[in-house]
Image (cartoon, rainbow, N blue to C red):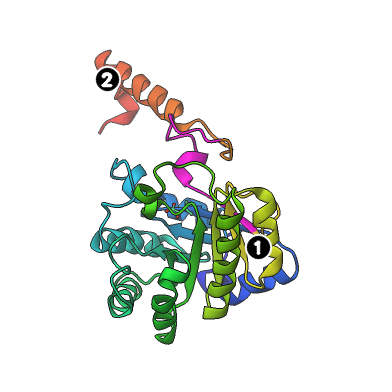
C-alpha cells in the first residue's frame, strides 16, 4: 500500500537525537541526483548526504576540491526534488567556507535557499568553529566532519587511517567536544580507529555517524556508488558492497548492443 505524502513522517535533526537516545542506529548514504535519491528515500534511508564526493563519482575528479558551490547546489536541488522522508544534508564544498565566517554564512544561506536542503556539513574542528557558530545563528543546522577530511588531502598526503597517534587522537576528541558545544546537531567521523570513534561517540550527546570508523558509533554512512559496486576500482577495507552494478550495467548494455546489431531489438511488440 502506498503512503500518502502528507502521512510520511519526515526525518528531522531532533529525531536523529532521539534515535541516539534510544540506541537506534542511523542509516545514511550519499546521493547526487533525482533518480538514485528517489530509490534510497523510498527504501527508508534516514539521512541523504549530497556529498562533495560528487566531485569524484559524478565528475571524475581525483579529489573533492574542484567541485563548486553552484555545482553542489545543482546536485542538492535534484536530490531534494526526489525526497519525501529523509533528512537532506548538503556538503559545503572546498573554498566556500574556509575564508571567513561571513563567506561561510553566505555559502550556507545559498545552499539552503537555492536547494531546499535541510542542513549543511563542513569539514574541520577548531579551525572552522567560528564559521559554524555564525551559520547556526541563521538557524541552519550544521553537521561536523572529523578524522579523514578529504578537502585537506593535500595536507595529509594520503587517504590512510587518521588519528592513530595520540596527539592527533587527542585533538580529534577536543574538536568533537568543540563542535558539540558550538551546536552541531551531528558529527561524521571518517577513517579513524574503531576504538577512538566509540570513545568519541560515547563522550558526546549528539549522534556520531561513522565511515570506516567501526561499529561503536551511532550510525553509518557510505558513498552510494561504492556500496552499489559502481566504482569498481575502489575497495577499502571498510567498504561492504551490496551489489555489483558495474558488471550488471555493463552486461545489460552489452546485451542491448548485441540486440541492436542483430536487429533483434525492437521486435514487433516494441514498435507502433
Ligand atoms: O562527500 C562525502 O561523500 C562524504 C562522506 C564520505 C561522509 O563526506
Taking the view exactly as shown, the residue that stands out farthest to the right is 22
Which residue is at 31% across, 16% downward?
258
Give the foreground label among 2 and 1: 1
| Magenta stretch: includes residue 147 | no
Of the 4 image quadrants, the one containing the N terminus is: bottom right
| Magenta stretch: includes residue 226 | yes
Q: How many marks?
A: 2
What is the secondary structure assignment of the residue under circle 2? helix
Q: Position of residue 196 (x, y in %)?
A: 66, 55
Q: Position of residue 120 (x, y in %)?
A: 42, 69
Of the 4 image quadrants, the one containing the C terminus is: top left
Q: Is residue 81 above or below residue 7?
A: above
- Give the extent of the magenta segment: 219-236
Residue in the foreground of this view, choosing between 55 and 29: 55
Q: Quadrant of residue 270?
A: top left
Q: Is residue 124 left or right of residue 213?
A: left
Which residue is at 73% across, 71% downward?
21
Q: Position of residue 37 (x, y in %)?
A: 44, 54
Which disc is residue 260 wearing? 2
Residue in the foreground of this view, choosing between 79 and 201: 201
Which residue is at 24% across, 63% downward?
70
Residue of label 1:
200
Q: Is residue 16 visible?
A: yes
Q: Position of residue 41 (x, y in %)?
A: 51, 57
Taking the view exactly as shown, the residue that stands out farthest to the front is 167
Amino acid at each position: 500500500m502506498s503512503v500518502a505524502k502528507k502521512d510520511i513522517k519526515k526525518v528531522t535533526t531532533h529525531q536523529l537525537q532521539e534515535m541516539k537516545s534510544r540506541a537506534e542506529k542511523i542509516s545514511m548514504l550519499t546521493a547526487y541526483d533525482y533518480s538514485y535519491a528517489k530509490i534510497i528515500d523510498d527504501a527508508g534511508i534516514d539521512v541523504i548526504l549530497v556529498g562533495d564526493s560528487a566531485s569524484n563519482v559524478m565528475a571524475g575528479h581525483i579529489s573533492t576540491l574542484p567541485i563548486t558551490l553552484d555545482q553542489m547546489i545543482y546536485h542538492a536541488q535534484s536530490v531534494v526534488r526526489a525526497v519525501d522522508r529523509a533528512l537532506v544534508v548538503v556538503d559545503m564544498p572546498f573554498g566556500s567556507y574556509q575564508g571567513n565566517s561571513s563567506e561561510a554564512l553566505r555559502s550556507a544561506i545559498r545552499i539552503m535557499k537555492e536547494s531546499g536542503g535541510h542542513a549543511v556539513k563542513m569539514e574541520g574542528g577548531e579551525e572552522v568553529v567560528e564559521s559554524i557558530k555564525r551559520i547556526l545563528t541563521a538557524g541552519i543546522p550544521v553537521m561536523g566532519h572529523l578524522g579523514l577530511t578529504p578537502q585537506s588531502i593535500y595536507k595529509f598526503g594520503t587517504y590512510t587511517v587518521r588519528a592513530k597517534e595520540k596527539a592527533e587522537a587527542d585533538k580529534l576528541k577536543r574538536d568533537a567536544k568543540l563542535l558539540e558545544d558550538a551546536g552541531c546537531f551531528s558529527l561524521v567521523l571518517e577513517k579513524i580507529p574503531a576504538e577512538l570513534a566509540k570513545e568519541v561517540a560515547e563522550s558526546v550527546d549528539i549522534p556520531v555517524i561513522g565511515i570506516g570508523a567501526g561499529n561503536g558509533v551511532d550510525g553509518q554512512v557510505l558513498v552510494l556508488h561504492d556500496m552499489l559496486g559502481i566504482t569498481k576500482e575502489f575497495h577499502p577495507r571498510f567498504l561492504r558492497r551490496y551489489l555489483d552494478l558495474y558488471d550488471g550495467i555493463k552486461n545489460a548494455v552489452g546485451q542491448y548492443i548485441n540486440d541492436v546489431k542483430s536487429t533483434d531489438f525492437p521486435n514487433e511488440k516494441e514498435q507502433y
